[in-house]
Amino acid sequence: GQQLNQSPQSMFIQEGEDVSMNCTSSSIFNTWLWYKQDPGEGPVLLIALYKAGELTSNGRLTAQFGITRKDSFLNISASIPSDVGIYFCAGRVTQGGSEKLVFGKGTKLTVNP
Amino acid sequence: GAGVSQSPSNKVTEKGKDVELRCDPISGHTALYWYRQSLGQGLEFLIYFQGNSAPDKSGLPSDRFSAERTGGSVSTLTIQRTQQEDSAVYLCASSLVGGPGTQYFGPGTRLTVL
């Protein structure tokens, strides 16, 4: 089946540093999504990407939809303590009227004040 | 409400008992998904409902797991004869099929099987 390889698995950074994480796949996706999950909560959508090559920003977050449609990255600039959490990438698959998301295994981010 | 809601938020049960988990999707969302998230792990797809179509049950791990969606809205995930390995957070999400495709998640139900 389709799989997403998300890296790194975890990151430990100092407040103020920039962060970069990415997802790759052998499959093509028509949409890439990035979610953040805080402890005890469900994932919350951060950024959605719909076109190959698209670069989208949301505050300190920037994400890109790879030109091959098989990868995406998420950058966080000037990290702050509330950026702590698990970040998931997801690729959307549309097949015969059915829509599903395939999720990466997550990047756990720790920010030291 | 404005978002996806799930109940209960926490459920502790004994091995062998049945449990029911409930999800109320965002009003008007035609698609509903159930996922399982084990401690420190990613999201494992369980089942997907879309409108009146037959559900996609391809992710259900065993025949002890089943789900219903009544009236195209509320969904119930049932786990029969629970086992300790069923302990996890069960997340529900909904989306508007044909729209942007983004899924909105509920807060989850944390299930602990003793």
Image (cartoon, rainbow, N blue to C red):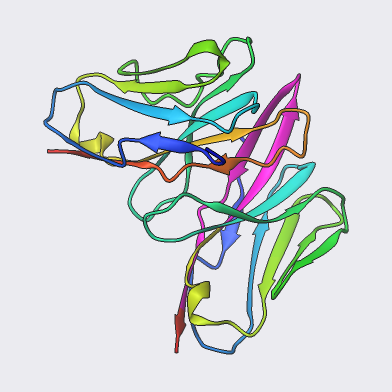
Quadrant of residue B110 in the image?
top left
Please say whether residue A2 is visible from this viewpoint: no
Left or right of A7 in this view: A98? right
A108 part of magenta stretch: yes
x and y percentages locating residue B35 in the rendered image: 46, 36
The C terminus of chain A, quarter of image: bottom left
Please say whether residue B9 is visible from this viewpoint: yes
Left or right of B36 in this view: A22? right
Residue numbers of the magenta segment: A88-110
Main SS of residues in magenta = strand
x and y percentages locating residue A105 in the rendered image: 50, 53
The residue shown at (35%, 46%) is B38
The N terminus of chain A, quarter of image: top right
x and y percentages locating residue B54 in the rendered image: 58, 10
Left or right of A74 in this view: B7? left
Residue B20 vs A32, above or below: the answer is above
- Front residue of this view, candidates A87 and B59: A87
A21 part of magenta stretch: no
The total of numbered circles placed on residues is: 0
- Front residue of this view, candidates B66 and A39: A39
Residue B28 vs A93, above or below: the answer is above
x and y percentages locating residue B103 in the rendered image: 62, 40
The residue shown at (87%, 52%) is A52
- Front residue of this view, candidates A50 and B104: B104
The residue shown at (48%, 27%) is B59
The residue shown at (57%, 41%) is B2
Quadrant of residue B77 in the image?
top left
- Front residue of this view, candidates B105 and B56: B105
Of all residues shown, which one is farthest toward the front? B1
Quadrant of residue A97 in the image?
top right
